[in-house]
Amino acid sequence: MYFTDRGTEELEKRRGEEEVTFEWLAEQLRAFVDLNPDFEVPVERLATWLARLDDEDDEDYPDDGDG
């Protein structure tokens, strides 16, 4: 189990029955980064990955130049 699984499991347990829009999710991600600027790159990578899930031409992760 990854450390992040705890947070993911808590999210699923507490809010798993809710339905949200991607607009709402994007707003929450922006608010999180405003409060936690050190997480800007990981949040951007997650958002890009989610946005491109159905795009067969893209890699699993965007090329951000970090290798």
Image (spheres, helix red, strand yellow):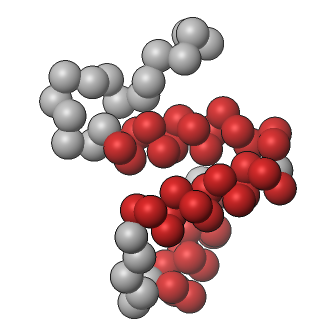
Query: Quick check: 15 above or below 11?
Result: below
Res 1 seen here: no
The answer to whether any part of residue 61 appears in the image is: yes
Q: Along the horizontal axis of the image, is 3 left or right of 13?
A: right
When asked about the image quadrant of residue 22, the answer is bottom left
Relative to 58, say whether 66 is above or below. Answer: above
- The structure residue drawn at horizontal position 35% and vertical position 44%, both measured from the top left corner, is 51
Q: Nearer the viewer, residue 27 or 43?
A: 27
Pick the residue in front: 22 or 45. 22
27 sits to left or right of 22 = right
| Number of on-image labels | 0
Say which of 6 and 56 sits in front: 56
- Residue 3 image position (x, y, % from top left): 67, 57
Q: Residue at x 49, y 68 (%)?
A: 24
Residue 2 in picture, x, y percent from top left: 59, 54
Q: Position of residue 44 (x, y in %)?
A: 57, 38
User: Considering the image in quadrants, where does the C terminus appear?
Assistant: top right
Q: Quadrant of residue 48?
A: top left
- Quadrant in the rendering for residue 1: bottom right
Residue farthest to the left, as pictured: 56
Q: Relative to 63, is 57 on the left or the right?
A: left
Q: Residue at x 19, y 22 (%)?
A: 57
Residue at the image position 58 percent from the left and 61 percent from the top: 27
